């Protein structure tokens, strides 16, 4: 049987990529299957050598029917994910438009502004949290000092320990540290838009808002959709910001799924129960990603047909 040059090329590519695929499968598939196995047992840190007994879906049912599940779900989905991602996308778009504006170019501030935008992004999350905890400190923090000196408040505010301010404080830290990536990505997408389109629209009498709505925004939507998906998945699974800022407190007021996984595994020592929460998170994100891609896939198809 004679193999065509095209088939030979495909086989060569396949055999060259096979080792990489095997490494990725071993690196991701084995921990995933092992975690799934643990989620059906009652294993704890004290019984690692002995192993746990099979308990079926008990861990899942206990978590989904627990009294804390509703609060944890709201904290994770609404406060940590929906609010912070929305704020980041909007601010990132505004920053991108500003950095691409003719005003900054005329003032020769484009380079400086872009460098300033990159500073928060270049700051490690741990450092960012520590810096913001100092800024928000009720005793030594400069934010409280400024608010007191300006007369806006009469007593210091414990931003990370007060129920009314703790989530805005966490979201502020996340937004400050991660928005630059979105801004830079949207700026790169902005610079791919043909300038002729806006010039032609301006000649036809289109306003700035109409140019943004009908030219700029449609060009940016593919980038925005990808950034939104990545931000949702990354934020939904994030542990660092909440734990380092509040330790899931005050009490368990800011407890989210990622911190619940940690506390059940390393404080309550319930590895099996913690694994069940982790699997639940993975299933939720897999479902969200599938629906997200399906929606945008259908949208793209409708656009092509139209």
Image: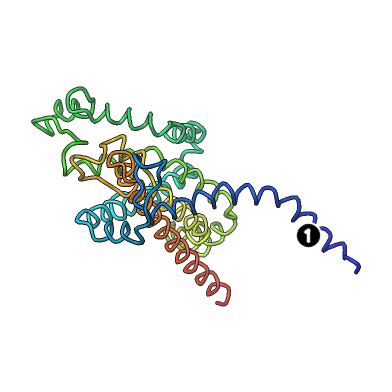
Q: Residue at x 9, y 30 (%)?
A: 155
Q: Nearer the viewer, residue 153 or 281?
A: 281
Q: Residues within 10 Å of mark 1 (few under 14, many from 20)?
A: few
| Whether residue 236 is visible | no
Q: Residue at x 42, y 56 (%)?
A: 282
Q: Residue at x 36, y 48 (%)?
A: 43
Q: Tell me if residue 215 comes above or below residue 85 in the rendering.
A: below
Q: Return the residue found at the far bottom.
A: 305
User: Residue 33: x, y in percent?
Assistant: 49, 54
Residue at the disc numbered 1? 10
The quarter holding residue 67 reads bottom left
Left or right: where 189 falls relative to 250:
right
User: Residue 233: x, y in percent?
Assistant: 43, 52
User: Residue 69: x, y in percent?
Assistant: 25, 56
Q: Residue at x 44, y 40 (%)?
A: 180
Quadrant in which the C terminus is drawn:
bottom right
Q: Return the residue found at the far front.
A: 50
Left or right: where 243 falls relative to 19:
left
Q: Tell me if residue 29 comes above or below residue 176 in the rendering.
A: below
User: Residue 250: x, y in percent?
Assistant: 18, 39
């Amino acid at each position: 049987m004679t193999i065509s040059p095209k088939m030979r090329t495909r086989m060569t590519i396949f055999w060259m990529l096979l080792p990489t695929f095997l490494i990725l499968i071993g690196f991701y598939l084995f921990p995933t299957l092992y975690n799934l196995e643990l989620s059906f047992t009652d294993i704890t840190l004290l019984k690692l050598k002995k192993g746990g007994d099979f308990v079926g879906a008990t861990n899942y049912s206990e978590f989904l029917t627990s009294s804390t599940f509703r609060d944890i779900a709201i904290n994770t989905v609404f406060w940590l994910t929906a609010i912070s991602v929305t704020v980041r996308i909007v601010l990132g778009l505004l920053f991108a438009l500003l950095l691409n504006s003719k005003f900054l170019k005329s003032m020769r501030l484009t380079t400086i502004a872009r460098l300033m935008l990159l500073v928060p992004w270049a700051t490690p999350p741990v450092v960012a949290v520590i810096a913001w905890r100092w800024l928000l400190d009720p005793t030594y923090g400069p934010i409280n000092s400024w608010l007191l000196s300006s007369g806006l408040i009469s007593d210091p505010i414990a931003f990370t320990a007060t129920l009314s301010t703790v989530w805005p404080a966490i979201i502020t830290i996340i937004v400050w540290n991660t928005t630059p990536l979105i801004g830079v990505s949207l700026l790169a997408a902005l610079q791919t838009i043909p300038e002729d389109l806006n010039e032609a629209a301006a000649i036809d009498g289109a306003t700035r808002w109409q140019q943004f709505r009908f030219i700029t925004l449609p060009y940016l939507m593919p980038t925005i959709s990808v950034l939104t998906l990545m931000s949702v998945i990354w934020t939904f699974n994030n542990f660092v910001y909440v734990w380092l800022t509040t330790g899931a407190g005050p009490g368990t007021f800011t407890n989210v799924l990622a911190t619940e996984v940690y506390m059940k595994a390393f404080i309550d020592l319930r590895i099996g129960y913690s694994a069940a929460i982790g699997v639940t998170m993975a299933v939720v994100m897999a479902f969200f990603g599938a629906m997200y891609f399906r929606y945008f896939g259908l949208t793209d198809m409708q656009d092509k047909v139209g």
